[in-house]
Amino acid sequence: MQMKQLLQETKTIAVVGLSNKPDRPSYGVTKYMQAHGYKIIPVNPTCSEILGETCYPDLSSIPVPVDMVNVFRKSEDCLEVAHEAVKIGAKSLWLQMGVINQEALDYATEHGLTGIMNKCLMVEHRHLGL
């Protein structure tokens, strides 16, 4: 699937590792995506709400279907996130710029998810003019 089609078909984005601090990249990228009409679901066990949305401790706790799992975590934490993304039936796994875990990406794609690694969701969204 091409990136433009992926972003056009994505409506709901679970953001694993979303920070509640406005100076963090995860906050800025997620706020941008939210401002462009995407439903954002923060995944952070230390917060109850970020950007006006209810936070969940993990992907499995989210009560609605998720299209994309966007990951702002250490690269070594991504395989577990990929397992959860498959388990909840997400359609794609996006590992943000600097988040590199080939095993996690391979696991996701082997289970039918579209996988993107080491790219910024906001930069790609802007680049595609969506």
Image (tube, rainbow, N blue to C red):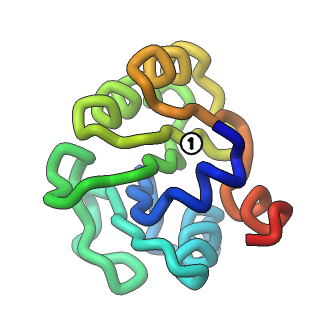
The x, y position of residue 39, in whole percent, is 41, 72
Which quarter shows the N terminus? Answer: top right
Left or right of 125, for residue 79: left
The x, y position of residue 116, in whole percent, is 63, 36
Please name whichever residue, 44 or 95, is drawn nearer the observer in this view of the structure: 95
Residue 45 lies in quadrant: bottom left
Please name whichever residue, 113 or 98, is drawn nearer the observer in this view of the structure: 113
Task: Give the mark count.
Answer: 1
Left or right of 4, for residue 81: left
Q: Is residue 78 above or below residue 93?
A: above
Q: Is residue 41 above or below residue 112?
A: below
The x, y position of residue 61, in whole percent, is 15, 51
Q: Amino acid at mark 1?
A: Trp
For mark 1, what is the residue?
A: 94
What residue is at 24 percent from the left and 74 percent from the top?
54
Which quarter shows the C terminus? Answer: bottom right
The x, y position of residue 4, in whole percent, is 71, 54
Left or right of 124, for residue 37: left
What residue is at 52 percent from the left and 80 percent from the top?
37
What residue is at 22 percent from the left and 53 percent from the top?
57
For numbered disc 1, what is the local secondary structure?
strand
Please name whichever residue, 41 or 9, is drawn nearer the observer in this view of the structure: 9
What residue is at 50 percent from the left and 42 percent from the top?
73
**Crowd band around label 1 with a 10 angstrom C-alpha radius: few (<14), some (14–19), many (20+):** many
Q: Is residue 13 above or below residue 92?
A: below
Residue 27 lies in quadrant: bottom right
Q: Is residue 12 above or below residue 36?
A: above
